[in-house]
Amino acid sequence: MKYVRTPKPKRPKSQIPFRLNLLFFVVFLLLAALIGQLAYLQIINGSKFAGEVDRTDQTVVAGAVPRGLMYDVKGRPLVTNTANNAITYTKSVGTSAAQMYGVANRLADYLTITPTNLQPRDYADYYLADADHAKAVTAKLPKSQQTLTDASKLYKLQAAYVQAHLPTFTSTQREAVMLFKIMNGATQLTTVLLKSSGVTVAESSAVGEHLTSMPGVNLGTDWEREYPNGSSLTSIIGTVSSAKSGLPASGLTSYLANGYARNDRVGTSYLEQQYESILKGAKSRTQVDIGSDNSIINQVQEFKGKAGENLNLTIDLNYQKQVEKVLTSTFKSALSNGAARYSDGAYAIAMNPQTGAVLAVAGLAHDTKTNEITDDALGSINRSFVMGSAVKGAMVLGALQDGVITVKNNTQVDTPIYLPATAVKKSVYPAGTFATLTATKALEVSSNIYMMRLAMKEGHASYVPKSSMTLDNDIFEKMRGYFGQYGLGQKTGIDLPGEVSGLTGDDYANGLLKVGSALDLAYGNYDGYTLMQMAQYISTVANNGYRMKPYVVQSIAEASGTGKSNRIVDTTTPSVLGKTGNTQAQLDLVKQGMWQVVHGTDGWTTATSLNTLNPGVAGKTGTAQTFTRRDPTNSQSELLETTTQSFVGFAPAKNPKIAIAVVFPNLRGDDLANYNLTVAKTMFSTYYQQYNIAKQSGYSAHETKLQ
């Protein structure tokens, strides 16, 4: 059988050449496109792209402007700026250590500066900036280290060697080290101060003549804060960081994100900090053109900058000085006779009760170990004290709201309270002095018993003398709620940072309600309050129940060319934080009681030394039994029993224009003078004089009715 081989079918001849031709055509098109693009780039736009490579970079450099000023309510300067000649340095892009080394050496020949806080590493950085020095140091390293290709590792070894073998530096070289350190620490295109105070005419002239040989160095101006009134109000005004310290570490990221440079000065406390965005102004802006070799080839100022806006405060400088004067003299008097030996200091505030504007705020901090006295006006918002009976007005008003007494029915027995295993709870005067008391009489003679019995009624007390007493578990919350309506125990909202809300005692001990402490709270001998809270509280009573937000900045104004205030751009509007739940009749009842505190005729009336003031004033004294350490820095030192004196009041009582609060904490002695009233009387009388408050005709020192 034969097998026949069948031949394979042949492809059409035309199919193979067609596919090859298609492939060649596609390749041709791609090459053509590539050649076309190259022609476009090199022939048509060649010069354009060449210029793009060689073009200059543009950046904007910001320059400092004068900080805003502060004035009192009548336009008297409280904080100003002093312009000083300065030597500045702006680091260009790509500036090398060797270039800064040369500039620092030349500049040290013309300037006299005092090197400060120089570390061995600073000397090493300066020394190694000289190429010959760096080469010589490298030669002294072990051979295995000399050939390191990692420049940063090699530099660390070089710096370590120099620090271990520091050469001797002349005084001029040490100055150069200081200058080099400042320049080396600057960021690119940021201006830093090389010398900002004490620059002499000779130094300015010498530097100015050689500016061309010292790239980046220039003559400039620096601004320093000046306080025309010395230490008065400095703690309220606050502080500004120095050019050397620059931005504070806390909040650094936020500052940088908002356009600050690391060496910018910023407010670091109180008004300077609170109003930083207002006071800082707007920096100048200069467009800088940088060539391909990193040199600055052109500078054009786009915006000359705008000085910071000024703050006009509510405080009257003349009145402020008088308050400071009487507070200081009275405290020194207490110190001289031993009464203030362990006292923290003394504080006083005056406020417009209708608006919340602070008229004066003064404070003294006393170091009981050194006897040093320093300004501490801010203690009025960040220190808390147990104020004593001065808060009794708030207690009565709370009881009236609660309904446990009424305007027409508010008489209570004045019998001491006896709790088991506790000393008798009574008033200062002997038991039995009064059988019963009304609310106004209780305020006049400062009855502790009356206030404690109000707390017992609010807490639905079950009381068996010398045996037991129970109160509702919410008694603390209830009383503090009423106090809070008047600002006691909570932040006042004043436009200053650092305010505290006070000190709140514990409600319970070992799971049991602290009944005795609840009674103490009723007459002001438990919780602690700031003096600003006390001022807000008495202002609320004075203005018939409106809790006003205190403030110290009256307005913000643009700075004129001379730095003085110009156009007002913002004014503080008085702000009502809340309205108390009392009726006008209830408020009038308490105001009548406060009038009798000054004008009553009983032998136990507590503030009769103020009854000669005309127009008449109303107020409430406070005396709290407190404790302090013999050595406040040692928690194990002896605990001393002390007395804290306070006072709150308003005047003229029939049309209040001023409310004041005073406190003298931790006094010692069996027969203390009324330091609180001495200060209060001067605060009222000085206000009358400076603001021309007319005397009232027919006024009687012992007028018994306010209305």
Image (tube, grey):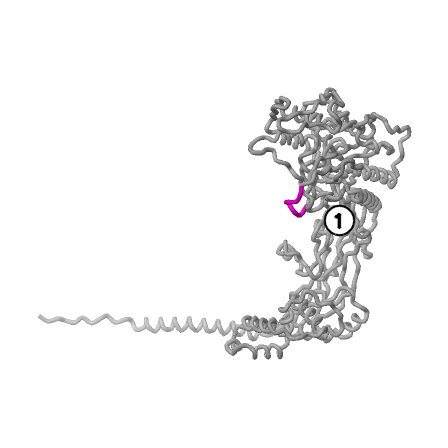
Mark 1: few/some/many CA within 10 Å (<14, 14-19, 20+) = some
Disc 1: which residue: 371
Q: Which residue lies furthest to the left in this view?
A: 1
Quadrant containing the N terminus in the rendered view = bottom left
Q: Can residue 484 be seen in this view?
A: no
557 or 437: nearer the viewer: 437
Quarter where residue 611 is shown: top right
Q: Find out whether residue 637 is within the magenta segment.
A: yes
Residue 560 placement (x, y as % from top left): 81, 55
The amino acid type of the residue labelled 1 equals: Asn
Q: Which region of the structure is painted magenta?
A: 632-638
Residue at (78, 71) in percent of width and height:
203
**Residue 685 in the image: above or below residue 92:** above
Tell me if residue 104 comes above or below residue 341 in the rendering: below
- Point 84% across, 33% down: residue: 609
Q: Quadrant of the C terminus?
A: top right
Question: How many badges with numbers are in the image?
Answer: 1
At a point 66% along the width and 29% down the height, the residue shown is: 423
| 517 within the magenta span | no
Is residue 422 in view? yes
Up-down: is 127 above or below 477?
Answer: below
Q: What element carries label 1?
A: loop
Q: Is residue 544 left or right of residue 40?
A: right
Asked if residue 155 is positioned above or below residue 342 in the image, the reply reads below
Of 549 and 616, the residue lying toward us: 616
Place of residue 237 in the rendered image (x, y in percent of width and height, measured from the top left) = 75, 50
